[in-house]
Structure formats: C-alpha cells, structure tokens
Amino acid sequence: MIDKLQTRITCCTLCAARFAATETAHQPRPVAWLSANAPILIAGQAPGARVHQSGRPFTDPSGDRLRDWLGVDEAVFYDRAKFAVLPMAFCFPGYDAKGADLPPPRICADTWQDRAISHMPQVKLTLLIGSYAQKWHLPETKNLSVTARVASWRDHAPAIFPLPHPSWRNSGWIKKNPWFETELLPVLQARVASLLKDL
C-alpha cells in the first residue's frame, strides 16, 4: 500500500499551473520519501532549488547542517529503513519576481499529509523543521513563534522535536539561542542513536 501511495505522490501534478506561473516556470518534481520501516520522520517545509534538481531530499548545505544536528552521516540519512522525509509541500515552490522563496502550497498538505502519515504508524520520532511543519503537526502552538516552539521542546519530546530550519541563514538565530546546541541537540542525538542502534 505504501508503495502505491509513494507512486501516486511521485506522479502528482496538482500544482503544475501554479509552478509554471512562477519566475522559475518549473515543472512539478515531488520529493517525498515514505517508508514502512523508518522509525524517524523528517517533516520539513518544501524542497529547495538544489533538491528539485537532484530529486533527493536535503542535498544542500541545509542538509549538511541537519545531518550534523542529528549526528548521522549521508549513508545513514539516506537509508529509507531509517529515515522517512515528508515535507509540507513535496515540490520546489519556486521564486517570486524578487527572487524570494514562495511558500509551500497548502493544497499539497491538504491532499497528501494525512494519507501519508497514516501509512507510517511505525514512526517513533518526528522532527518538525520550520514553522509550516510545526503549525500542521502541533496546531495548538500555531500562535507561537518558531523560537517559542523550539524552546518548549521538552513538552513534546521524545516523540516530537520542533527544530528551526537548518538553513545557514539561521546561523544568527543559533548564536542568539545557545541552549539549542547545548541542551536540545545532545538529547536529540541520543534519541536518534537509540532508535537506529538495532537497525
């Protein structure tokens, strides 16, 4: 069943007209990795331009930083028996006329999120990367800032960890919030290691 759903997602063209109207005028290329075995789910925002080109999630500097946060290398990260990846929008949304990232189209999450999650009951740890994923998975926190959600990580651990986006543009945020690296990341890395040790 999960393979059929993955195929349907991979072939999705719901937003073809929307993407054609962006500055990048690109075609849909859904990048979502479902898994019937992976204990860890990465719930992010949407693929960037580099991921759109590669067809693999987090093949960019943000992915390098995320893997560092998790304490895993590429071989482990790209093992679908260990990690599933389900962003709020599966395709690169494109850029606006000023070259800024467009938000993930809501129709993607409305169409696919609940179905995809229902096919992965084995997930024991969900990483919520950025505000879009956090608002979807933790609707009771929708009025909070990303900082406030991440700061309250103990309220959701060990099953859920809200995280800032690993973009290098957030380096300033990390410096202003040293507790993220000194308090949250060691606990997160220990949790990841415990889930992966027997796989």
Image: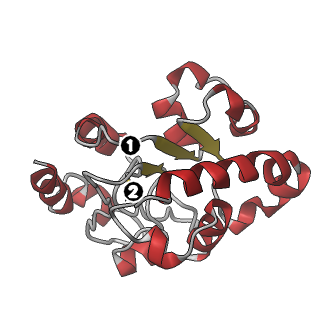
Could you say which is closer to the camera, residue 163 or residue 169?
163
The label on residue 57 is none
Could you say which is closer to the camera, residue 59 or residue 127?
127
Taking the spot 64% from the left edge, 47% from the top edge, the residue there is 163
Pointer 1: what residue?
123
Element at label 2:
strand
Tell which tag, 2 or 1, sits nearer the viewer: 1
Taking the spot 41% from the left edge, 46% from the top edge, the residue there is 88
Image position of 46 with respect to 56: above or below: above
Residue 65 in picture, x, y percent from top left: 66, 69
Residue 89 in picture, x, y percent from top left: 37, 51
Residue 52 in picture, x, y percent from top left: 38, 73
Residue type, mark 1 in image: Val
Q: Is residue 130 left or right of residue 115?
A: right
Circle 2 Cα neighbour tier, 10 Å, few/some/many (<14 / 14–19 / ≥20): many
Circle 1 Cα neighbour tier, 10 Å, few/some/many (<14 / 14–19 / ≥20): some
Pointer 2: what residue?
85
Q: Quadrant of the C terminus?
A: bottom left
Residue 177 in picture, x, y percent from top left: 86, 48
Element at label 1:
loop
Taking the spot 42% from the left edge, 68% from the top edge, the residue there is 57
Taking the spot 58% from the left edge, 65% from the top edge, the residue there is 98
Could you say which is closer to the camera, residue 100 or residue 110?
110
Q: Is residue 44 left or right of residue 22?
A: right
Image position of 100 with respect to 184: above or below: below
Q: Earlier in the sequence, mark 2 or mark 1?
A: 2
Could you say which is closer to the camera, residue 89 or residue 58?
58
Quarter-wise, where is residue 12 in the image? bottom left
Quarter-wise, where is residue 47 in the image? bottom left
Residue type, mark 2 in image: Val
Q: CA distance from mark 2 to mark 1?
A: 11 Å
